[in-house]
Image: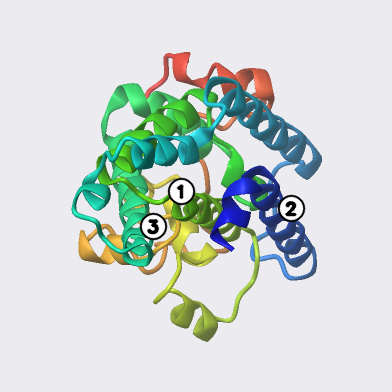
């Protein structure tokens, strides 16, 4: 099973991406959480365009992606797990959890450091949040993130199969927790024990800075509680809260050319 995942990495990732995307898209149609403010066709075209561009660039610059770094670490006996001979199952589980913590820490870092925030804010200027927002990231942010993942994979010697599993989980949960879907409050409370839910993460996209700087998790919800960045509910409630950034309200920022030049805009946060 592990070798199947590794040998068919691209196919496995695309299958899960397509499956979760279709499921969340249908859920948004039949049970939306909020009324969208911006033309859905405009946002989807541009958000999915930058997603396709990112996929192309990652494969061009990093042909083997993060799983390639895992193979290199294994072949050369690099990384803590390889050096102390941690059982593969345990190493894989710890690798997935550590990568998720890394993404959480990276997310905070990208908010705190102005240079990286300039690229990350493209994700936040979306005036609505739905399934396509989960893949709306600036190409440079994707490259920065990939380099960071490379470092962690090699430092720990994370097994290749668990790197693929983590990437699949990250993509799937990112689309899930950005989805504009209605979910029963009781179910939401239960799910928040195991995974970041849409209502939990939507707060992070609030125009209110205190809310933007909370709920940084993408996959596991534990880190926000552990490091006290968790916020349970938005001040104005989910239906009335305003999404996006205060200085990027014009519709032009929803188009691909302006999305790509966002880092170079001379505007405050």
Residue 145 is left or right of residue 21, and the answer is left
Decide: few, some or many residues near mark 2? Use Cα within 10 Å; few <14, some 14-19, many ≥20.
few
The reply to whether the C-beta atoms of the residues labelled 3 and 2 are less than 8 Å apart is no
- Residue 93 position within the rendered picture, expressed as x and y whole percent measured from the top left: 36, 64
Residue tagged by mark 1? 160
| Closer mark to the observer between disc 3 and disc 2 | 3
Residue tagged by mark 3? 96
Query: Looking at the picture, does residue 92 appear above or below residue 188?
Result: above
C-alpha separation, residue under disc 3 versus residue under disc 2: 22 Å
Question: Which is more N-terminal, label 1 or label 3?
Answer: 3
Q: Which mark is residue 18?
A: 2
Query: Looking at the picture, does residue 71 appear above or below residue 251?
Result: below
Residue 189 is left or right of residue 175, and the answer is left
249 or 225, which is in the foreground? 225
| Closer mark to the observer between disc 3 and disc 1 | 1
C-alpha separation, residue under disc 2 versus residue under disc 1: 22 Å
What colouring does the structure picture have? rainbow
Image quarter (top left, top right, bottom left or bottom right) of the N terminus:
bottom right
Inspect this view and state whether residue 130 appears: yes
Decide: few, some or many residues near mark 1? Use Cα within 10 Å; few <14, some 14-19, many ≥20.
many
Image quarter (top left, top right, bottom left or bottom right) of the C terminus:
top left
Secondary structure state at the residue bearing disc 2: helix
| Closer mark to the observer between disc 2 and disc 1 | 1
Query: Looking at the picture, does residue 149 appear above or below residue 184?
Result: above
Q: Looking at the image, which residue is at 30% across and 41% down?
A: 152
Q: Quadrant of residue 198?
A: bottom right
Q: Looking at the image, which residue is at 60% across and 50% down?
A: 129
Decide: few, some or many residues near mark 3? Use Cα within 10 Å; few <14, some 14-19, many ≥20.
many
- Residue 203 position within the rendered picture, expressed as x and y whole percent measured from the top left: 44, 57
Inspect this view and state whether residue 230 appears: no
Q: Quadrant of residue 145?
A: top left
């Amino acid at each position: 099973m592990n070798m199947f995942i590794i040998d068919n990495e691209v196919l496995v990732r695309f299958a899960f991406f397509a499956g979760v995307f279709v499921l969340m898209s249908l859920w948004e149609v039949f049970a939306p959480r909020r009324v969208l403010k911006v033309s859905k066709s405009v946002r989807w075209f541009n958000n999915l365009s930058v997603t396709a561009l990112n996929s192309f660039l990652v494969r061009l610059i990093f042909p083997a992606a993060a799983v390639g770094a895992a193979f290199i670490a294994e072949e050369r006996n690099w990384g803590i797990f390889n050096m102390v001979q941690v059982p593969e199952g345990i190493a894989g589980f710890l690798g997935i959890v550590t990568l998720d913590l890394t993404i959480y820490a990276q997310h905070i870092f990208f908010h705190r450091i102005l240079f990286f925030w300039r690229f990350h804010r493209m994700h936040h200027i979306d005036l609505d949040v739905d399934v396509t927002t989960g893949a709306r990231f600036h190409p440079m942010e994707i490259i920065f993130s990939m380099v960071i993942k490379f470092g962690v994979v090699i430092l720990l010697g994370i097994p290749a199969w668990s790197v693929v599993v983590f990437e699949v989980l990250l993509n799937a949960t990112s689309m899930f927790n950005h989805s504009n879907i209605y979910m029963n409050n009781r179910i939401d409370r239960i799910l928040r024990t195991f995974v970041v839910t849409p209502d939990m993460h939507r707060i992070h996209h609030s125009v209110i800075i205190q809310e933007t700087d909370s709920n940084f998790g993408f996959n596991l919800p534990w880190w926000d509680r552990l490091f006290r960045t968790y916020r349970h509910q938005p001040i104005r409630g989910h239906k009335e809260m305003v999404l996006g950034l205060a200085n990027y309200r014009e519709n032009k920022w929803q188009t691909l050319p302006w999305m790509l030049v966002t880092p170079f805009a001379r505007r405050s946060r």
